[in-house]
Image: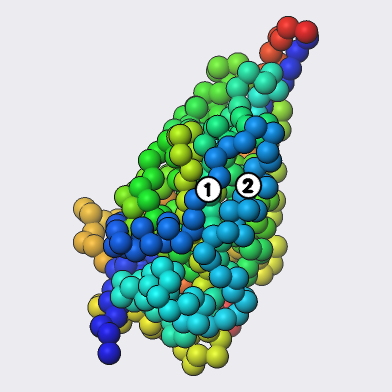
Amino acid sequence: MQRQKILVLYTANSALDSPVIGWSVYDGTGETRPMAGDQDEPPYRTGVDALKDGWRLIQAAQLLPHGRGEEFDLAYLKYEFFFEQLVEVQP
Amino acid sequence: MTYLPLLNAQQMAQFVARGFLRLDGVVPEALNAQFLQEMGEIAPPVPGRGLMRTYGEMLAKAGVPEVAAGTPLDQAYPEGSALAKLVQLPVVAGTIRSLVGEDPIFDHHFLHVTFPPAYHEASGGENVSQHTHQDSTIDPRTAFDVQIMYYPHAVTREMGGTRFVPGTHLRRVSEVALGRYQNIRGQQHMVCEAGTLLFIHSGIWHGGGVNLSDRTRTMFKIRINPNPRSSRTQVRQFDVSTLVPQNQQRPIFYVKGPLPPSVEQTLMTPEPWFEQDTGRLEFLNRIRLWRYLTDDPTYDADYWLTRVENLAEV
């Protein structure tokens, strides 16, 4: 039986080899309980380092044009990459 | 008339750039003790008893008045109460005056208590940190509210003090829509001595930490608005005599060494989490906020706004 572990990395630009500036982990195995504020240093220096460690990239944020009049507005982090690992668990 | 210690230009620039000011141990011990005594005892954990019930009873019992939103701040608290004394402390009144101006308005307050593991085990709930969020709702104003976080007792790292991300206050987000972000480079956790105050811009991203200690953690928050009926609200309310006239722009990009401390240097200091492109937009937004607070529509730092406002084609 397999369960999914999810790693979300936010990087400094749209390149997967740019520095990680934010991160989250969600553990479908239930073995760990990651939560907000639980780690002050990123688990990987870049997104590519996560690939090297066996994480599979499953989604990357799109690059979208800036709407006229909204060019300077800032909201959410732009460069979001979702990774997964499939982990065997006992039934 | 009581002397009001106003923030200087450098402190204001720090607030504009980073969205917070931290004043460690400025509340006298006697006032901290009075506040905690007025809040009352928190009931011990009882097996099978929901935490919301414990919390509700605590709020009902605590010596904090229900105050109508929109009340003048100076009428919010009974004279002689710990909270009245708190907002009357010269350092507090001076900081409030500098950040939101004369005759500020009470928005709301809340008694935040985070419970140690024993309470969660007794109630059957999960002991987790609060998702990171921005308070209230989407706020497109340049004007801002201020929130005072008051820590009446010492907070250790284990107690899960307020987590916040410096420099996030100028982002227009929708409350806990950003709850997906667990950790952001440069995040800070409040670890402090008793009587510490954290003044935050209402837009800053923050959340309560998980309490892994063996005692409850108490923090009291007061949100304050500038008064829209005051003629100048937040503008030029800090100690403007400390502003240094700007005769010319600093050299940019090609500089042969570190530049001296200045308001510009503070406004142009990035946070560890800044994206490489939007970090520059953060600088623009800081400059715009500085223009507002100093009432100087021509102010610029490192040419960011001058360049995009150069409408040569018209």
Disc 2 to disc 1, C-alpha distance: 8 Å
Task: Tell me the number on the disc at residue B42.
Answer: 1
- Residue type, numbered disc 1: Ile
Is residue B227 something that shows in the picture? yes
Residue found 54% across the figure and 32% down from its top: B117
Residue B64 sits above or below residue B258 on the image: below
Contact? badges 2 and 1 (CB < 8 Å): yes
The foreground one among B312 and B273 is: B273
The foreground one among B71 and B234 is: B71
Dot 1 lies on which element?
loop
Dot 2 lies on which element?
helix
Residue found 55% across the figure and 18% down from its top: A52
Residue A30 in picture, x, y percent from top left: 67, 21
Total residue callouts: 2
Q: Residues within 10 Å of mark 1 (few under 14, many from 20)?
A: some
Residue A86: which quarter of the image? top right
Q: Residues within 10 Å of mark 2 (few under 14, many from 20)?
A: some
Q: Seen from this angle, which residue lies furthest top?
A: A90
Q: Is residue B130 left or right of residue B18?
A: right
Residue found 46% across the figure and 61% down from its top: B38
- Residue type, numbered disc 2: Thr
Q: Is residue B26 left or right of residue B156?
A: left
Is residue B9 something that shows in the picture? no
**Residue placed under numbered mark 2 in the picture:** B54
Residue B202 in picture, x, y percent from top left: 53, 65
